[in-house]
Image: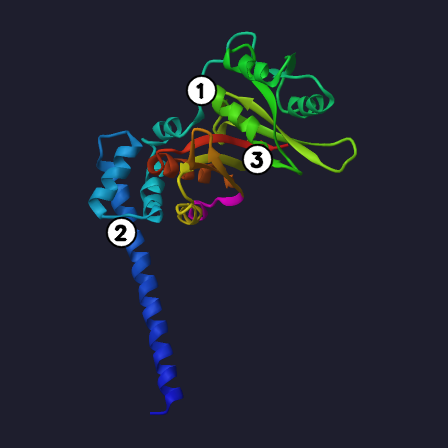
Amino acid sequence: MHSNDKLAILLDNLKICDGRTARDFEQQNICLYEIATQLCESSDSIEPAELVTRFFELTGAQSLADAILICSALISHPSFIEPIRHAVSVGHDEQTPAGSHSRIAYTKNKYNDLAFESFSEKINGARAHYTASLADACEAVNDGECEFCILPVRNSIDGRLWGFYSMLDRYGLKICSICSVESLDGISSTDYALIGKFCPEPTKRVQNVSRYIFEFSVLSENGDFISELLHAANLCGATPLFIDSRPVEYDVQLCRYIFSFYTEAKDSLLLRLLLVTHYDSYSPIGLYQKN
């Protein structure tokens, strides 16, 4: 047989094998999803993490891609949707103290005033509350004196402003919205964040807006997990926007990786459930729109 003919036959056989592999993979995913659905139907538990663990024990599944199947089944089941929203909420949903509703704390200057004006367009009855420092603004929200505060979080020259992100951790606050303010000379711009204790679920926000930015952090000694996380996020329908990292202050061997993704409302719920159930060091930073 001519070598070219033999090569052609081998290539045809390879295509057949690839087709079989693809069909087997598809059938396997269908089977895993059906198992996940049946598990949701038959389980007495309403704790999402317990069902995810049970799914892995039963099926021997290991990858994040497999985990998406059980997470998808969970968020599609009416009995689990509210427990899941509670489990993956970005911040703590607390009653807004009387008198603090729509009050925004910030240090008065021209740029903060412009940010306040931008946020006021989406907050009914927004009221300014001036503070002597940014720390005081955060404390005003933490103490219930104000519903929100304003902090700069990123600029076009330095990128992410890590010092202000550490204030979010210190006071347990989350990013609820972002607006961009240009410098007076028009050369640079700064992203200002509207900061609060809790980010409402996207379904409770503006109904004609479906795309959000979801921001979160994961602690790790290395970045080996990043490729698998990005692949899983892609399967969840999320598009990466930024990835930043820096050593944490208390352990130089440990890095904090911050991820920002564009995501649809339902996809955000799926991705957050995946993160809650698979990364012990996962911490949500914000779920917001950019003005």
Q: Does any portion of residue 271 appear in the rendered image?
A: yes
Which residue carries the number 1 mark? 93
Q: Nearer the viewer, mark 1 or mark 3?
A: 1
Residue 193: say if magenta: no
Q: Nearer the viewer, mark 2 or mark 1?
A: 1
Position above or below: 195 against 268: above
Residues tagged 2 and 3 counted as in contact (Cβ below 8 A): no
Q: Which mark is residue 209?
A: 3
Which residue carries the number 2 mark? 31
Q: Amino acid at mark 1?
A: Asp
Name the residue at 38% across, 26% down.
Answer: 86
Position above or below: 29 against 126: below
Q: Does any portion of residue 40 appear in the rendered image?
A: no
Residue 133, given in percent of the width and then of the height, sits at 62, 16
Which range is magenta? 233-241
Is 129 left or right of 55, judged from the image as shown? right
Q: Earlier in the sequence, mark 2 or mark 3?
A: 2
Is 237 left or right of 46, judged from the image as shown? right
What's the distance in space between the residues labelled 1 and 3, CA to CA? Answer: 22 Å
Name the residue at 45% across, 16% down.
Answer: 94
